Image (tube, rainbow, N blue to C red):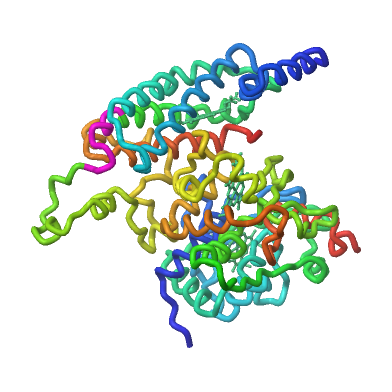
Amino acid sequence: MIRNGTLGAIALTMLGVVAAAHNGATGVVMERMMGMSAMRDVMRDLAPMMQGQVPFDGITVQEAAAVLQSHAGDQMLALFPEEPIPASSFAKPELWQKWDRFAALSAELKLYSEGLAVAAANGLEAPVPMAAPEAGTDSMAGMDHSTMKMATEPEKFSVAELMGVSKRAAAATGQSGELAVASDLPAGPQFAAMAADDVFERISQTCASCHSQFRNGN
Amino acid sequence: MITGDAYRGAYLARTSGCIACHTNAAADGAALAGGAPLDTPFGTFVPPNLTPDPVGGIGGWTLDQFAVAVRQGVRPDGKALYPAFTYEFYADFSDQDIADLWAAFQTVPPVAEAAADHDLMFPFNMRWGLKLWRAAFMSPAVISPVFGKSEAWNRGQQLVTGAAHCAACHTGRNMLGGLQADEALAGNANLPGGSAAPPILASVLAAKGWTVSNMAYALRTGVMPDGDVFGGSMAEVVQAGTSFLDDADRAAIATYLLALPAGVAAPDIPVADAGTPAMVHTPGMVME
């Protein structure tokens, strides 16, 4: 143990960020940490684009979505074999006790990543909904860039949503993990009607939801 | 008599964590019908049922009794409330704020079943001991606008040091559990469940790549500048709290935090919270 610790310390000093990032993990733990880190890098690169700070590029988003897909769902689950958790790992043992929930979150991530690839074509604007009779000529005429962007911004929440009486409709964020098992799954066609940044936010909610339950802080 | 505005109250309740703590969302519990148990070194606190039910909830309370509980942490029977309820951060709520909250609470369907009792270890289960704790350690938030600072900064100060109670987790405590005045927002390594909240001082945040805009974004989505997402209790703060705020309020929080000079304490930040390591060694708790 001591020897490992010392080696670990040397490795940390020498390899700096790389070793530190994975806490000296080996084997399957190392593998899943690398997968997670690959997803982190994707999120880091996409976030400025999703906020409109750098120009939107649908191809980049599709490639990023493919990276997420390759680390989600069953691929992710395969890297969490039930075993005593080594010191290098930040996983919580609860993930095996609540495996259904863990698996649902992993499946949800896969679903949303697929959805991101679809919604990438839309950029930051949801396509004008088919049924929008209220959008009369005067509101169309007044549409400039800022009102267009507003359409994808989360709506103000209702009193019932704020008080927790009804679930958030607009962002559908709070209920991560239940979506994947619910019957009203947003299937392909709905993603085609969503702005890319909305799908991106669902992805981040899924990461956060799983981490808050099954990952220890460092 | 002030008329409350349910929308403003609902927004304030969301901002202040009333909904997050008093609703057991993980167990699909009804809104405000009682929260998930908070594990602390002193035992388990169960945030009570706050629905307008006269038996299970607070339907039998008056507005004045509600005001005293929220701003001063005292129950209608005169007993003190445990600081696991973050009332110290709400001390500066105006009469209008309280009336708004009250109006919003009336919109929630009543639930007749009371929440479970706390399960606290002796001597922490002695509610009267709290009077002594209060005398020694209570630090109610007093927030005064600072002239010469922007509107966003002042709004941010109000949210960070008051309603949104960021310091509840991000400020450490000394051996006696008191506020480390010069370490406000300098992080806390001893949150319940063994987790840690990092410092959120401007110098530290800036070094990690935080800006007003990416922090406002993180408070909405959980995505940090390096692409990782918030974990632990911060994920819940975002999910059940800051993601509901207006963009302007998230930007205000970020503006205030990123403008705090290093080593200078934010004024009047109270420290008690669910973690309340504060209570471990307090005179009120160790005296018979």
Please state the extent of the stretch shown in magenta in the rendering.
A117-126
Query: x%, y% of residue B68?
Result: 63, 76
Quarter of image, res A89: top right
On the question of residue A21 being in view, the answer is: yes
> Residue B146: which quarter of the image?
bottom right
Q: Is residue B83 above or below residue A64?
A: below
- A124 in magenta: yes
Q: Is residue B155 magenta?
A: no
Q: Using the image as rendered, state which of residue A154 and residue A189 is in the foreground.
A: A154
Q: Main secondary structure of the magenta part?
A: helix
What residue is drawn where x is 27% and y is 50%? A149
Where residue B22 sits in the image (x, y, percent)? 55, 58
Q: Position of residue A103 (x, y in %)?
A: 46, 26
Nearer to me, A150 or B2: A150
The front one of A55 and A38 is A55
Write the residue at 63% across / 33% down.
Answer: A216
- Residue situated in front as seen by the camera: A200 or B64: A200
The total of numbered circles placed on residues is 0
Please give left or right for residue B264 compared with residue A63 in the image: right
Name the residue: 47% across, 74% down.
B100
Name which quarter of the figure residue A120 lies in. top left
- Residue B2 vs B100, above or below: the answer is below
